[in-house]
Amino acid sequence: QQQDTAGAAPTSWEGGYQRTGPLQFGGIVATKEQIAQVEEIRGQIANIAPAERAKMTDWVDTLLDEDIFRYVVQFKRSAFQKIKETAVFRAEEGIDQILQTDADKFERYFEAGKEEIVYLAPDKLDRPILLYRSAYHWPGVQDPKEYTRYILYQTEKTRQRYGLGITRQSCVIVERIGSGHKNQDPALLKVLLPTVLSHYPMYIGDVYIAPISTVFFIVWKLIQLILDEATKKRFHLLKGDYTAQLLEVIEPDSIPDTLGGSLDVADFCAKQRALDKVDMTLGKLEDQMLETNGKEGALSYGDKVASPDQLVAVAELQVGIASFSDSDNADFPWLATLQNVDIFRFLTVHGTVERTMQALKETARWRKEENIDSVLDEDLSHVFAEGKKEVFILPRDKLGRPIVVYRSALHVPNKIDPKLFTRYVVQQVEGARGEYGLGTTSQASFIVDRVGSGAKNQDVNLLRELVPTLQKHYPQTIDKIYVAPVNTVFFIIWSVCKLLFDQDTQARVVLIKGDIGEELLKVTPPEVLPKNLGGARAVPEAGVL
């Protein structure tokens, strides 16, 4: 909606912009002399000496008349020299590629909830608004050069999105509510202002500063030393009823409530973070849509590769999650953390967007009710007696799968509450996600170790609690289930227990007769496989010595 407010801005202004009417920028219409100087500079650019041109980027060849005109207005007869300096600066700092090289760093530059800089919808003059919340700035936290680079990243992004520097200037609001001497950063200003004024001339339209105080005037004296007279006139120090003055050029829903408007900046930033996340995930999906199934880069998990229809479905689900109301976000906080591959796992099981969304909501509700997001912080070491750990995780097998082992011979039915046992297993699965990428980049190999196990160890009540939990809330995370060894007693039990498994899970079960070590060592290194299963690994906590 913010972008729509600005009108139908093309994806790339440089690639599709065509001027209608006279050459102008920032309300200044070019005179005949200025038009002639623009043409003169264009000729000078074409004749830059090769040795000098080698130090510049191709940016200098892509300048629009509006770009050159900005330099002419700001620097007069020095415009061509300043353009060359900017071209060299862009080459040295890699500005032409900054949107690609610095995205990971600068899309999440500030701590969530403490954003110093927020970009808002355009004002009444159609200028995108940059809100600077000075009370959140602490000198020395960010390096002035890096902070300046962040500003340049956002400026380049706004040029691409809104045509900043081509058809529009920006409007800056400096909100000083709660700001004092501790928040002032002269070292940053000495780096930031000269860079912006030299290499992005006239990008900034008007700067509104409110409220002002005695402390600010001390800082203002320093700022004035860096600004030329024309730029000083664009700074507005708002006294008295600053809300009324801001309302002359800005809609109330773009003015922070701290300055008398109706914008809740914290809520706005939270929603913007969610939209940015979706923008990023949809970008990945778009790249994956260009890939043929099976090729590197396609969305896949386990042995399943997303079809074009499934990629569209994942995108639809991501958009649906981003469109949740505040109450939905409070009910389903886990959904906002999902990666594309997580959604794909659920989609492969449930088939349609509607059923997948319902399943995701049910898992999100279960995670909230059971406090699963904090399960790794719980001490569940008391669940099993010393030397009798029934469930444990081993390193990856030959196929790169982390191994989950269940030693059924140690299990005594009804000794451990099934819900507590299941919670312990969930804790192990959650830990494996962080350590081994379980559920995102890898599936698990699940070994049911039946060495020494018999009818006395079978626990249908436990299976009724554990199996549905894993199938429903961790779909597709298990690749193969190896049961070893099996005998006549087991087949009787299996004929009943398999009814708890869905068809997909049943197809993943491998029943091993005969030499279990020989079979398991085909997929498991000996140093990883426990000794009682034919390997060389001792697992003292589970009684394998």
Image (cartoon, rainbow, N blue to C red):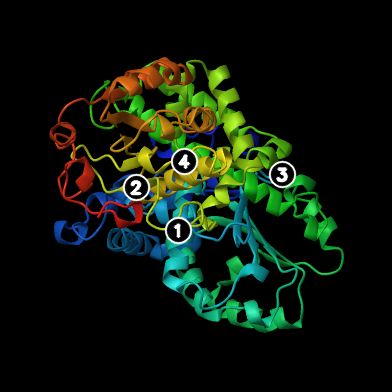
Mark 4 or 2: the one toward you: 4
How crowded pointer 1 is (Cα within 10 Å; few <14, some 14-19, many 20+) is rated as many
Mark 3 → mark 2, Cα distance in angstroms: 60 Å
Residue 393's label in the rendered image is: 2
Q: Which image quadrant: the N terminus?
A: top right
Q: Position of residue 329 (x, y in %)?
A: 66, 39
Task: Report helix, strand or loop for mark 2.
Answer: strand
Q: Which residue is mark 4?
A: 412
Q: Nearer the viewer, residue 67 or 377?
A: 377
Classify 526 as above or below 51: above
Viewer-nearest of discs 3 and 1 = 1
Which element is circle 1 on? helix
Distance CA(mark 4)–CA(mark 3): 73 Å
Could you tell me if the residues under marks 3 and 1 are in contact, i.e. CB atoms within 8 Å?
no
Disc 4 to disc 2, C-alpha distance:
20 Å
- Residue type (three-letter) at the residue carrying disc 4: Val
Alpha carbon distance from label 1 to label 2: 47 Å
